[in-house]
Amino acid sequence: MGIDPGLTRCGLSVVQAGRGRAILPVSVGVVRTPSDKDLTERLLRLSVAAKEWMDDYTPDVVAIERVFERGQVSTVMQTAHVVGVLVLAAAERDIPVYMYTPSEVKKAISGNGRADKKQMTAMITRILGLTEPPKPADAADALALAVCHCWRAPAIARMDQNGLGLGAKTSGVRGQAKKR
């Protein structure tokens, strides 16, 4: 499951990894919260939606975009609140969480850590064999996060198995969920 966290629009996606780099899209959507509502009400709405997705699709892993400073502190704080709600929802279901920076996702999907939204949407459309680009951008970003994790998971697992701890470096949350 890939999640592009946002207080106004939160992208949610589920994909199924196949052999090699083959990935099938299962579902994608965007949860919106009205900006005129209180923060607590908006976070509750996002929590309920994320839990419904997790319960309906029972993902093995959740990949979330890592919060980074974009200039406006209030936006960063709001996004951090959303990430906390999402991580808690996964933890309550014993689902491991991996976090990726936007540049890590862009590099994994397009080969360019500075790819723009248009390039990313085109690549994710092609990779998943979609007939139309996912809209809005939050949906495409959620799919990109899920695909990024699917492609990186084997290497992360090998590094962890060899005691090199790449998983811990890649994920600020990984390992805190109960082992299955």
Image (spheres, rainbow, N blue to C red):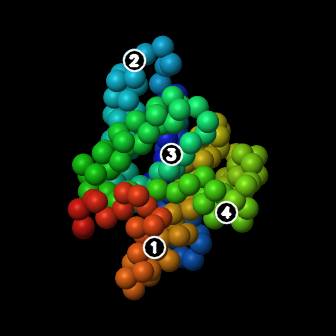
Q: Which mark is residue 129?
A: none
Name the one closer to the observer, 8 or 29. 8
Question: Label 2 vs label 1: CA separation?
Answer: 39 Å
Q: Residues within 10 Å of mark 4 (few under 14, many from 20)?
A: some
Secondary structure of the residue carrying numbered label 4: helix
Q: Quadrant of residue 71?
A: top right
Residue at the extreme top: 36
Residue at horizontal 33 percent and vertical 34 percent from the top: 48
Residue at horizontal 74 percent and vertical 48 percent from the top: 116
- Asked whether disc 1 touches disc 4, contact meaning CB atoms under 8 Å apart, the reply is no
Quadrant containing the N terminus in the rendered view: bottom left
Quadrant containing the C terminus in the rendered view: bottom left
Q: Residues within 10 Å of mark 3 (few under 14, many from 20)?
A: many
**Relative to 29, is 152 above or below?**
below
Q: Of callouts 2 and 1, which one flags the residue occurring earlier in the amino acid sequence?
A: 2
Task: Tell me if residue 129 can be seen.
Answer: no
Disc 1 target residue: 166
Decide if residue 177 is on the left or right side of residue 103: left
Q: Amino acid at mark 3?
A: Val
Question: Label 2 vs label 3: CA separation?
Answer: 21 Å
Q: Which mark is residue 38?
A: 2
Secondary structure of the residue carrying numbered label 1: helix
Question: Label 1 vs label 4: CA separation?
Answer: 17 Å
Q: Amino acid at mark 2?
A: Asp
Q: Residues within 10 Å of mark 2 (few under 14, many from 20)?
A: few
